[in-house]
Image: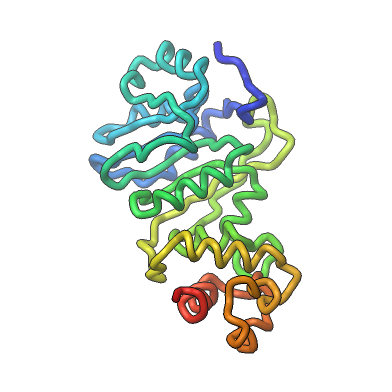
Amino acid sequence: MYILKKSLGQHFLHDENMCKKIVDQITIAAQLNLVEVGPGGGALSKYLLEIKDINYKAIEIDDDKVQYLNNTYPAIKDKLIHVDFLKAPVPFEDRFALIGNFPYNISTQILFKVLEWQTQVTEVVGMFQKEVAQRVVAPSGKKDYGILSVLIQAYFTAEYLFDVHENCFTPPPKVKSGVIRLRNANNPYAIDSFPKFLSLVKTAFGQRRKTLRNALRPLIAPEQLGDEIFNKRAEQLSVADFVTLYNTYFKK
């Protein structure tokens, strides 16, 4: 049997109905390329392996879990990539979807990896700490709207699907959990450089209590800071507003 490792943020999902419910959220099509992140003890894997006519891979960092999965689910052999997801190369040459009960201690980093791969990731169905899940889907003007909200929503449609009760896990986590779905919107704002857009958004939220005039002073020419938009604070700008800000004042 596998052993829990606190260092990897491991809480295993044992509620079979919830496992099936999460798996059911992925959009299945013939020859779908699907990557499971952190299969752990195989809670989702055993159902994913039963789906016909898809190309399935799983990425797992933990030596013990890799051995356990190979011994318990023979069908997973040759589909398991033993590597740290945050350092993993792109798992498919073509486009692919991601699914996982994501480790909470690296969930934000996982989402940044998704953004790094955004030209190839068609869909993400993932369980996160509820607080993180809510940040991802938050609209402008809400207190949990921030860097992650803007960046994800600039490239994906984000939907909060449902809560997952603590008692569905072994051991029960001390935080609430939630499942979200991201669907690739194919760069609808035609952002030409993710690193540059990221720099603008991070700087804008870096001093979120200040107006953009003060927060963006390091990035925007002084003669432009008198414009009306700079009277606002970062959380008041929609994703479209951030793109306008980027295109008008920062892109060049």
Could you say which is closer to the camera, residue 120 or residue 227? Answer: 227
In the image: residue 212, left or right of residue 249: right
Looking at the image, which residue is at 50% across and 33% down?
A: 19
Residue drawn at point x = 35 percent, y = 54 percent = 119
* x then y, percent, for residue 120: 34, 50
* Residue 199, quarter of the rendered image: bottom right
- Identify the coloring: rainbow
Q: Residue at x 62, y 20 (%)?
A: 4
Q: Quadrant of residue 206?
A: bottom right
Q: Position of residue 195 (x, y in %)?
A: 47, 59
In the displayed structure, does residue 103 sit left or right of residue 76?
right
Instruction: Using the rendered view, name the quadrant where residue 82 is placed.
Output: top left
Q: Is residue 217 above or below residue 203?
A: below
Between residues 197 and 252, which one lies in front from this camera angle? 252
* Residue 190 point in image, percent of width and height: 38, 70
Residue at 39% across, 62% down: 185
Find residue 224 and report its horizontal and vertical position in percent: 58, 86
Of the pair 5 and 160, the residue shown nearer to us? 5
